[in-house]
Amino acid sequence: MADRFYPFLHQDGVTLTELMVALVMGLATVAAVYSIHLVQVKQRIVQEDVMAMQQNARAAMDMMTRELRMAGYDPMGVNRDGGNSNDFPGVAYHSAELHIASDLNGNGLLTD
């Protein structure tokens, strides 16, 4: 009676066909998992590149904002001293460039 419900109990091994089918199924599973892994790795690399570009853009905007806010900083009052020889514009622009000038260390000179 047990032979009728469990005929595989008396088999001595697997056939070559069964082994090949199991091998192909295993390889297909491994290939699918590996391809999913590769897609995720590529997406992570792209995401890291985008984050780096955004961080660089934020840093550049922060630097420009800070420099524009400091444009015309004149703690020594050289622009108000009556002499025009040492006056400087805070922001000067031309068609292709922008110049930002400020006296950051407060000594009255822009060259340092």
Image (spheres, grey):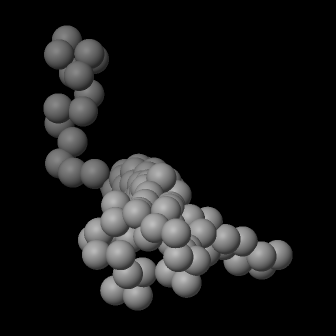
Residue 30 appears left or right of 47: left
Determine the residue positioned at 40% across, 63% down. 77
Q: Quadrant of residue 51?
A: bottom left
* Visible residue check, residue 99: yes
Furthest-bottom residue in this view: 111
Image coords of residue 19 (percent x, y): 34, 56
Determine the residue positioned at 71% across, 77% down. 97
Q: Quadrant of residue 8?
A: top left
Furthest-right residue in this view: 95
Q: Is residue 112 above or below residue 98?
A: below
Q: Nearer the viewer, residue 104 or 8?
A: 104
Residue 14 appears left or right of 78: left
Image coords of residue 81 (percent x, y): 46, 67
Image coords of residue 42 (percent x, y): 47, 61
Q: Is residue 9 above or below residue 86?
A: above
Q: Nearer the viewer, residue 47 or 16?
A: 47
Determine the residue positioned at 52% across, 69% down. 82
* Visible residue check, residue 31: no
Determine the residue positioned at 35% across, 75% down. 108
Q: Is residue 75 above or below residue 103?
A: above
Residue 11 appears left or right of 32: left
Furthest-top residue in this view: 1
Q: Quadrant of the N terminus?
A: top left
Q: Quadrant of the C terminus?
A: bottom left
